[in-house]
Structures are given as C-alpha cells and as structure tokens.
Amino acid sequence: AQKVTQAQTEISVVEKEDVTLDCVYETRDTTYYLFWYKQPPSGELVFLIRRNSFDEQNEISGRYSWNFQKSTSSFNFTITASQVVDSAVYFCALSGHNQGGKLIFGQGTELSVKP
Amino acid sequence: EAGVVQSPRYKIIEKKQPVAFWCNPISGHNTLYWYLQNLGQGPELLIRYENEEAVDDSQLPKDRFSAERLKGVDSTLKIQPAELGDSAVYLCASSLGSLGTDTQYFGPGTRLTVL
C-alpha cells in the first residue's frame, strides 16, 4: 500500500523566517515519483516539483529547496526567507511507476506567513 | 498556454438534485483525472481517462456518479442524486500521459455545497 504522511497540520511563521514542511511516504514500488503542490486560497493546485526515486540529489529553486532521503523515506520542503505570498496549503504526493499516474496525497500542511 | 479549465467554480444545490461539472484539459493532454477533495484533506482520485476511455474508475461511486469524456477532450462528471456528503471540491487534472514522469496539472476546482 502507498501512503503519504504530513504530520504538520498547520504552521505559522513570521515573514523572513525559514520553514520546513515534512513529508514521509510509504511504498513497495522500487520506482516511484514524489511531488509537491501548493494550493493557495484560490483553490488551484500548483505544481512545484517532481522527483523520481533514483535521484536523491537535493534541489534548489530560488527560495525553495527539497531534501529527498530514501533512507528515511522523506521528502521535505524548505522555504527560505518566507513571504506572505507563501501562505497556502502544501501537499506532498506519491505516484508509483505502475500506478497509471494515480497520485496519493498527504493531508496537507497549512502554512501561514504573517507580516 | 491555457491551463485546465473547470466550470462552474461554485455550485449550491438541494439534496437529491442532479449536478454536473465540466472540465477542459490542457491542449494535447491525453490523460484526464477527476479528484475529490474533502475539507482539510488531500485530493483522492475518482476516475482516470486515457483519451476517451475510462481506464481506472475503481474509486467512483457508480450508483450515483457518472463521467464521460467525449472525443477524448472535454469531460463531464455528474452526480445524480446528490447527497449531503457529496459537499466537497471536485478537481480536474490533465497530463500528457499516465506515466509517473507525466506531471499532472490541476484546474481551480468546483466547490459543491449540498443543502
């Protein structure tokens, strides 16, 4: 069975603070893909990143960075110098190679960045 | 490039009434997904289309839900009759294919309220 756990339901930070969103996954597939999506109040899920199970290199994109560790089945997301516009619900998701693209989502972490 | 379009954005109906949601995927995307998102939860897959064929509808409650994707482009999801528990956001997503490497892009969703 596949499962994604985002233990942090809500996080509140003050602008310019760094914040890390945790994601732990379970899968029996040897080939799988991990995703992060952002859902602002408008409701649309915005794609942020995709990682495959064979690429454990960390990735940085501007203020965003991702830490993928197979040893701990984690794919954590860090926002550096957070801004008010980062306020949203963030979802981690998992897709197995033979699952027809079906995404298994975590419950999401609601991030509130206060000025 | 236009994103995934959904309509209506909001719908309020009385229980036992029928309702339909419409989705226009990104041009050229062969795979279309309908997801259900309950409040405070991550999206869950209802049905996946490859072109006009429903290839995974195992999570679709077929007693009251139906879907179609005519000509392999636009899709309609219908509920008849609606129940109070159907109140949720219905998200449509599309991707080029259904491999794990094919990123899913989501529309803004339709928020359904059943009274």
Image (spheres, rainbow, N blue to C red):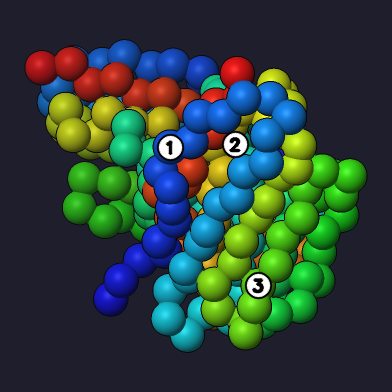
Q: Is residue B19 left or right of residue B95?
A: right
Q: Mark 1 falls on what kind of element? A: strand
Q: Which amino acid does label 2 sit on?
A: Gln
Query: On screen, B77 above or below A30?
Result: above
Quarter placement of the N terminus of chain B: bottom left
Whichever of labels 3 and 2 marks the residue nearer the N terminus, that label is 2
The image quadrant that residue A55 belongs to is: bottom right
Badge 3 and badge 2 both on one subunit: yes
The image quadrant that residue B84 belongs to is: top right
Q: What residue type is labelled 1?
A: Tyr
Q: Nearer the viewer, residue B52 or A3?
A: B52
Residue B35 x/y as whole percent: 63, 49
Q: Distance between the residues labelled 1 and 3?
A: 21 Å
The chain under label 1 reads B
Whichever of labels 2 and 1 marks the residue nearer the N terminus, that label is 1
Say the numbered circle drawn on residue B69.
3
Residue A88 x/y as whole percent: 33, 31
Q: How far apart are marks 3 and 2 (CA)?
A: 21 Å
The chain under label 2 reads B
Query: On screen, B113 above or below B68?
Result: above
Q: Nearer the viewer, mark 2 or mark 1?
A: 1
Q: Which of marks 3 and 2 is in front?
A: 3
Q: Mark 1 points at which residue?
A: B10
Q: What residue type is labelled 3?
A: Arg
Badge 1 and badge 3 both on one subunit: yes
Quarter placement of the C terminus of chain B: top right
Q: Which residue is drawn at 60% across and 50% down?
A: B20
Q: Is residue A13 left or right of residue B36?
A: left
Q: Name the residue under label 2.
A: B37
Q: Mark 2 falls on what kind of element? A: strand
